[in-house]
């Protein structure tokens, strides 16, 4: 959920081929415990408009900075900032057609993107930091 798996896979890929074991079983409850902690109404990891969405955005940005470097981090940050700025007027117009849920989601996403800004300097400097922000 917090992009650790993606980061681990990226690190492991640097070492070459992997040995996979097929007789292991994992039960994944897609966000079951996180939904309780974040009071989220959806199991989806694509909803970036609530508390869980903020943690996902922050974790994603940290992973991009660590794995791909400063330029990719700044590109992704600028894309999210631009999407949040452009998305609000579009969602506002859409709300006149009865899509108030879209406006609520877009407003939540916009707030989460702008809440990232205090963390940007720390992420850029790659300083060790505890990023869990329940």
Image (tube, rainbow, N blue to C red):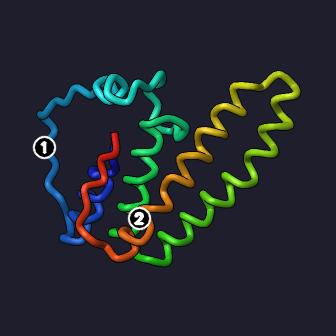
Q: Residue 30 vs residue 97: left or right?
A: left
Q: Residue at x 34, y 77 (%)?
A: 125
Given residues 82 and 8, the one toward you in this image is 82
Q: Earlier in the sequence, mark 2 or mark 1?
A: 1
Disc 2 crowd rating (10 Å Cα; few below 14, some 14-19, many 20+) is many
Res. 16 visible in picture? yes
Q: Quadrant of residue 102?
A: top right
Which tag is nearer the camera, tag 2 or tag 1?
2
The image position of residue 117, as x and y in percent, is: 50, 61
Residue 64: numbered disc: 2
Disc 1 crowd rating (10 Å Cα; few below 14, some 14-19, many 20+) is few
- Please, is residue 23 above or below residue 112 in the view? above
Residue 21: numbered disc: 1
Residue 83: numbered disc: none
Q: Quadrant of residue 18?
A: bottom left
The image position of residue 38, as x and y in percent, is: 37, 30
Q: Residue at x 48, y 56 (%)?
A: 116
């Amino acid at each position: 959920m917090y992009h650790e798996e993606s980061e681990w896979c990226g690190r492991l890929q640097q070492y070459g081929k992997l040995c996979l074991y097929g007789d292991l079983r994992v039960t994944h409850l897609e966000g079951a415990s996180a939904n309780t902690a974040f009071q989220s109404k959806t199991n989806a990891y694509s909803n970036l408009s609530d508390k869980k969405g903020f943690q996902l955005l922050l974790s994603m940005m940290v992973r991009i900075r660590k794995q791909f470097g400063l330029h990719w981090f700044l590109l992704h940050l600028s894309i999210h900032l631009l999407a949040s700025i452009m998305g609000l007027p579009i969602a506002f117009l859409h709300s006149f057609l009865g899509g108030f849920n879209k406006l609520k989601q877009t407003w939540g996403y916009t707030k989460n993107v702008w809440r990232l800004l205090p963390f940007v300097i720390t992420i850029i400097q790659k300083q060790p930091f505890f990023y869990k922000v329940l």
